[in-house]
Image (spheres, rainbow, N blue to C red):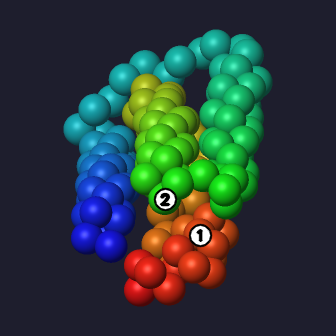
Amino acid sequence: MNNLDRDFRVIELIFYSILSIQMFLAVTFYYLRSNNIISMEDIDFEYLPLLVLMINTFFILSAKYFFTARNKIDIKLPVETKIQKYRLNTILIVVLLDTAFLINLIIYLLNGSQIYLLVGILVLILFIVYRPNKSNFYEISLTSNERSELL
């Protein structure tokens, strides 16, 4: 039980640290761009919206895949293996969605179009929806015997 709680505290610490950095960057980039502190020439690339759409789609679908894999960990595995798989899938989800968020923020900073900021905020909401949840892990991945031993 002690190891499981410690592992979840580490996973949650990683998640909330990255979430706070993302929110700080979003507010900072918005402030810099809206007050013309950073006023870059607009990127006039004709296919930029299509390219960003493809990048976002790739990262979001990849995160969805790992979210599904995280929720379908085999019950027959030992508890330590289950938590390792859960941790790995969670870190992959965090990295994928963080990358998509940062790409949208950087393009917003360079381009100035608020649609990229909005898409970044939507990715941030998805990031929050996919957060690690210890009670969900207990329900989905642990057998009733393992739950009774750990609680």
Residue at point 57%, 79% (across, down): 145
Asked whether residue 143 is in view, the answer is yes
Using the rendered image of the protein, determine whether residue 122 is visible from the camera's viewpoint.
no
User: What residue is pinned by disc 1?
Assistant: 142
> Dot 2 lies on which element?
helix
Horizontal side of residue 22 vs 93, given as left or right: left
Residue 138: name its quadrant: bottom right
Residue 2, horizontal then vertical, whole percent: 25, 70
- Amino acid tagged 2: Val
Tell me the quarter of the image containing the C terminus.
bottom left
Picture coordinates of residue 116, whole percent (x, y): 57, 41
Residue depicted at 49% across the width and 70% down the height: 133
Q: Residues within 10 Å of mark 2 (few under 14, many from 20)?
A: some
In the rendered structure, which disc, 1 or 2, sits on the residue that comes first in sequence?
Answer: 2
Residue found at x 43% / y 19%: 41
Query: In the rendered view of the protein, which quadrant contains the N terminus?
Result: bottom left
Give percent across and percent down for residue 5: 31, 70
In the picture of the structure, the residue carrying the numbered disc 2 is 79
Compared with residue 52, is residue 121 higher up or lower down, i.e. above or below? below
Q: In which quadrant of the rendered view does residue 129 lie?
A: bottom right
